[in-house]
Image (cartoon, rainbow, N blue to C red):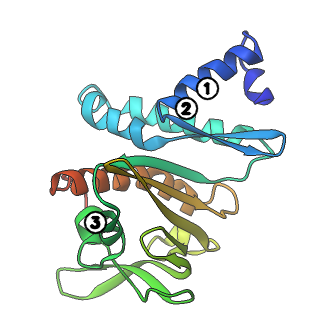
Amino acid sequence: MGELADFFEFSRFAVMKHLKVLSEANLLRIEKKGKFRSIHLNAIPIQMIYDRWISQYGKHWASALTRLKYEMEGESKMEEVKQIYTLYIKTSVDKLWDTLIQSKITPEWFAGMAVTFEPKVGAKLTYDVTGPDGNKMSVVQGKVLEFDPKKKLVYTFKLVAEPKAAADRESRVSYELEPVGDSVKLTVIHDDFDGKTPTYLGTSQGWPMHLSNLKTFVETGKAMDLPKMH
């Protein structure tokens, strides 16, 4: 928090007030670690604002916002590199859970990728696409680390289909579901990177798009018209 306040001419207290407003609007997430606070921009509502209002005026605005996210998350030397996304989806826990883990459903919102895994710790997990010739190709490979039905899924993540990212060490992804009224709070955390690797840079662009599509698909029954993996 102190390092962030140094960038502004007003007081640390004023910075905290601004951050509180942004946090209440679900535009950022503040994590306490001992006497330190880590600040992460929540890219999902920003992406949704872009999809609804900004895209017609120019893509450079979205690019500037994502650069701001990278800079804010990279300013603190005490903070590990991670991505945190929080969104609220008007649906049931059962429906959202199935949408996240069922191989026949994930292609609808996750760029054509079908997830396959056994629901147990230690099981192999893959995200595959099917080409025009009917052959399958793995895009992501990993292993299930935690499996708590309808509450939490954690798995390792290796982007094998991207040559620049294939050499990166496995990172980690977690889905956490929490019922809130007539909706579900979904928190997606992608961490355990060795810095801003090709995997980090690629997924930081991909997750906001895919999760925005997930919300749209679950709430409306129809996905957005987005590119598929080939």
* Nearer the observer, 68 or 29: 29
Q: Quarter-wise, where is residue 97 in the image? A: bottom left
Between discs 3 and 2, the one toward the N terminus: 2
Between discs 3 and 1, the one toward the N terminus: 1
**Label 2: few (<14), some (14–19) or many (≥20) C-alpha neighbours in 10 Å:** some
**Label 1: few (<14), some (14–19) or many (≥20) C-alpha neighbours in 10 Å:** some
Question: In the image, which is nearer the foreground, mark 3 or mark 2?
Answer: 3
Q: Type of residue at label 2?
A: Ser
Does residue 208 appear left or right of residue 53 in this picture?
A: right
Residue found farthest to the front: 181
Does residue 44 appear left or right of residue 198 in this picture?
A: left
Q: Secondary structure at mark 3?
A: helix
Q: Position of residue 224 (x, y in %)?
A: 20, 51
Per the model, the C-alpha gap separating discs 2 and 1 is 6 Å
Q: Type of residue at label 1?
A: Leu
**Label 3: few (<14), some (14–19) or many (≥20) C-alpha neighbours in 10 Å:** few
* Label 3–label 1 contact, CB within 8 A: no
The number of callouts visible is 3
- Please give the residue where the numbered disc 3 appears in the rendered image: 95
Q: Is residue 19 above or below residue 87?
A: above
Q: Is residue 30 above or below residue 192?
A: above
Q: Residue at left 84%, top 40%? A: 35
Q: Residue at left 31%, top 49%? A: 182
Q: Position of residue 46 (x, y in %)?
A: 41, 35
Q: Which mark is residue 23?
A: 2
Q: Position of residue 21 (x, y in %)?
A: 54, 23
- Quadrant where the C terminus sits is bottom left
Q: Quarter-wise, where is residue 192 in the image? A: bottom right
* Label 2–label 1 contact, CB within 8 A: yes
- Please give the residue where the numbered disc 1 appears in the rendered image: 19
